[in-house]
Amino acid sequence: MKPTRLPASCLLSAAFLLVLALLSAVPSQAKSYVFFQGTQYPLAVYILKGLQPGPTVMVQGGIQGDEVSGFLTAETLSRAHVRRGTLIVVPRANIPSISRRVRAVNVDLNRRFDQPYDDYYEDALARVIRLLLARSDAFIHLHEGSGFYSPTWINAERNPKRWGQSVIIDAGIYQKTLHLSNMVESVLTRLNPHVRPASYRFALFNTETFAPNSPYGPEMRKSLTCYALKEHRIPALAIEVSKDIRPLDWKVREQLRAAVMFLEKFGIRLDLPPLKGVSFEHFADRPPEIRINGQTFKPGATIEAVAGEPLRVEVVRGSGDPFFHANPALFADGRLSLDLTKTDASLFSQVKRLDMRADGNELGSVEVRYTPARSAAGNTGQTPVFEVWHNGRLEEVASGQTMQAVEGDQMLVAGVRPQAGNGRAEIINIKGIVTRVGENTGQDADTDVVLDSGLFMPRYLQRGPDGLPRIQVCRETPGARPAAFYVSLAPRRVAGIRLDGPNGQTAMLPFRPGAGCRLQPGTWTLSEAWSNGSQDRLVALVDGLPLAFGESFTLGMGSSVSLEILQAATFKPLGRMTLAPAAMASLATKAGS
Ligand SMILES: [Zn+2]
């Protein structure tokens, strides 16, 4: 376990802080944070802090989108009330794969941890997962595997090549210190007697990942549990239920029971939300309400739209099943990489059909019927205009123009107006980057691209008249009028941050990486950052964990807090400052540290 942040010598102030914390009468702190908001792969993280100090344990589900129990179990845990320790929950690690109910979209995200990759959206997700794991003392991964694992061959369904109903570890004892098999055995001894039928009991599955002759080694060495062991030397395990057990309700409840037992083993104390009467079976039948141009989505309906005007898509939060909050998706004309519920941007170009899904469950489609534009100022015959989603907002960029962006912004090119004839799909080539797995076809439409000059092939990085690096985006649709625009990339600069303090005071801090700053102890709100781009392209980490703008952190009397600002998409550091309590120097001297 990592040491607590307060030095032992500051016992007085620690005791005082504890009293303060108890007085504040907050039962526990639950915070959520969404990484990559406005992209096709938002990643929600819940940080549940108990009043009693304890270890930090991370639980993750949904890394492979066809393993439904994992994300339902994690989702349920994200509503737990934590009494002791800190629980970090990532319920749906891989939203695009969940929306398609496939194991992998470009690459298997659970095979991207043997080295830092930088190729696909999966690699951006892996960066967040690594960042959270670095703050954790233990890790539990929730999966759903085929068949039933058995160390010996029993039949086709039950043998060493199956993964279901097992608890997976990479080593029995890791580096002589982590006794993983003992720990798992002791939990299974308590868990299994209650598993009915007995043939569904969980087996210990040691993949011997580090043994040179392990048949599982080559794959498992790329996995996240292996990374947790190797990089952080923290206990890590995977709880697999079986895809061959039908009732989802059974699987989620058993996986949940197992997860809670392991969490308790790691030192977390928690209360689950009330689950009586809750059915996990039809979780994705009642997603939140989706409105398109103000009309509620109903399978088979027709949506009215005006040619040349963007479709407006809204997710009505708080509607649908109050317990599950299935993740909705709305796809236009079968374009599965363009989920219209994930962004404020929309489509100008005409679509025929919209398909709705909830956590990958297909819920039907609507037709879209266009009436001609009200104004006569149609775009036909004029300069082609690109539909660009820039940081999740729609921008129209005419051919020949330059779009101003900041390093670390995100861009998705959704189409061109006027559209190519005969409903042909537009081919959009973003020069200098390959966005589709294993193919360099030049088709980069509908793909989120991080505008980081380091990710582009150097020979395609031109220098614009403003001296800044720029890239080119070309329309290469056969038979269509050629068109292109530039994207100019300015470096991102953070000028300052605004903090609002415990007594209503405001601190305007110039952002100077490496500098320190003294503040009155108490609760501070991270209100704002001034930079040359949009604030949502910045991630703030307080003591290594994400803090949304508008949320607060506590500056204790006995310890300082680190405030780090990163580029949101790439996590490139923009700088770190230390915030120290104003009275800390004198206190520390008195305590004799
Ligand atoms: Zn899996």
Image (cartoon, rainbow, N blue to C red):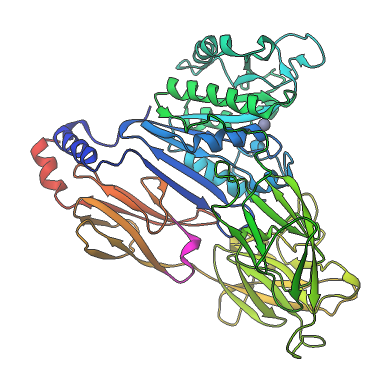
Residue drawn 60% across the image and 49% down it? 320
Res. 143 image quadrant:
top right
Which of the image's four quarters has the N terminus? top left
Name the one closer to the observer, 478 or 196: 196
Give the answer, above or below, for where 311 lies relative to 569: below
Instruction: Residue 114: tell me if it is visible.
Output: no
Residue at the far front: name it. 277
Residue drawn 39% across the image and 24% down it? 267
Which of the image's four quarters has the C terminus? top left
Residue 264 in the image: x percent, y percent?
Answer: 43, 22
Magenta includes 138?
no
Q: Is residue 191 left or right of residue 431?
A: left
Instruction: Residue 581: tell me if it is visible.
Output: yes
Give the answer, above or below, for where 152 lies relative to 327: above
Q: In this view, does 12 lie to the left or right of 147?
A: left
Residue at the far bottom: name it. 376
Residue drawn 65% across the image and 28% down it? 220
Magenta-colored span: 531-539
Residue 259 in the image: x percent, y percent?
Answer: 52, 25
Residue drawn 17% across the image and 34% down it? 15
Q: Quadrant of ligand 1?
A: top right
